[in-house]
Image (cartoon, rainbow, N blue to C red):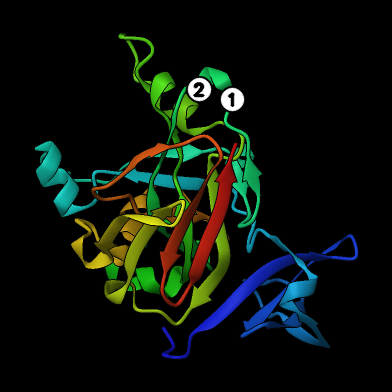
Amino acid sequence: MSATVTRWIGFRHDGAAGFGRLDGETITVFEGDLFGAPTETGRTLPLAEVTLDLPCRPSKLIALWNNFGALAEKLELSRPEAPLFLIKPANTYRPSGATIPVPEASGRALYEGELAIVIGKAARDVSEAEAMDHVFGFTCINDVTSAAILKADASFTQWARAKGLDGFGPFGPVVATGLDPETLTVRTLVNGRERQNFPISDMLMPVARLVSLLSQGMTLEPGDLIACGTSVGSGPIPKGATVEVVIDGIGTLTNRFD
């Protein structure tokens, strides 16, 4: 990937959706396909004058379990031979800045700050050596979980339902290209207090291996997200709290949970 970091942002302005390149506090507006050959329109917009939207529209959001050494050690989990994952539905997607209602029936919600891989070119049965050619960039994600629903039935752990409620997969604020994921650190703050701080270099399956293994028999489409999993420090979201997932080079995903 390029050494130059580019940050792509989705927005709404005057009732219309758009996307562009974020340069400081200014958006250079583009048109076309973000994952194709988008072109500049010649327009710019101040960031302060737009409402943040999703930076891309995934056909699926793949969420990893047990992919960090520190958490595996804490929970005494064995190293997985293949990615352990679930798929979160589109109703979970929300942009940075959105307020997310937490249903009473879900009990307490848990935050999980994570790095997400954004696919840029369709990948099916790709090798690890080829995998990075299919990665467009990276974004921040909060893989929210309902603890009460997860283990409500002793006969079946309800991963899909517990993680599939409306707004339980916010991501953004941008998709950043040109980053080296091995140098990144994920921080999660709840009401301004740091609760998670862990390096991506602790991933049991790094980015290229994840993309390769997940593409075996399952086509990864442009815009799809792979949430790389979380590490130690996940915990409850108090009602009315603001949760921030911070990754330098990408920015801060911010959502209030009511």
Query: Would residue 158 be seen by someone viewing this image from the given angle?
Result: yes
Q: Is residue 24 above or below residue 201?
A: below
Which sits in the foreground, 145 or 233?
A: 233
- The amino acid at mark 1 is Pro
In the picture, measured across the screen, residue 168 lies left or right of residue 47, that is left
Q: Which residue is mark 2?
A: 106
Disc 2 is placed on an element classified as helix
Which sits in the foreground, 57 or 256?
A: 256
Q: Horizontal and vertical percent for residue 199?
A: 25, 65
Residue at 57 percent across and 51 percent down: it is: 255
Label pair 1/2, CB-CB below 8 angstroms: yes
Q: Which residue is mark 1?
A: 103
Real-space Cα distance between discs 1 and 2?
5 Å
Residue at 70 percent across and 77 percent down: it is: 20
Q: Horizontal and vertical percent for residue 41?
A: 82, 85
Q: Horizontal and vertical percent for residue 202?
A: 19, 61
Q: Residue furthest right?
A: 14
Which sits in the foreground, 7 or 83?
A: 7
Snapshot quadrant of residue 183: bottom left
In the picture, measured across the screen, residue 58 lies left or right of residue 228, that is right
Residue at 50 percent across and 65 percent down: it is: 252
- The amino acid at mark 2 is Ser
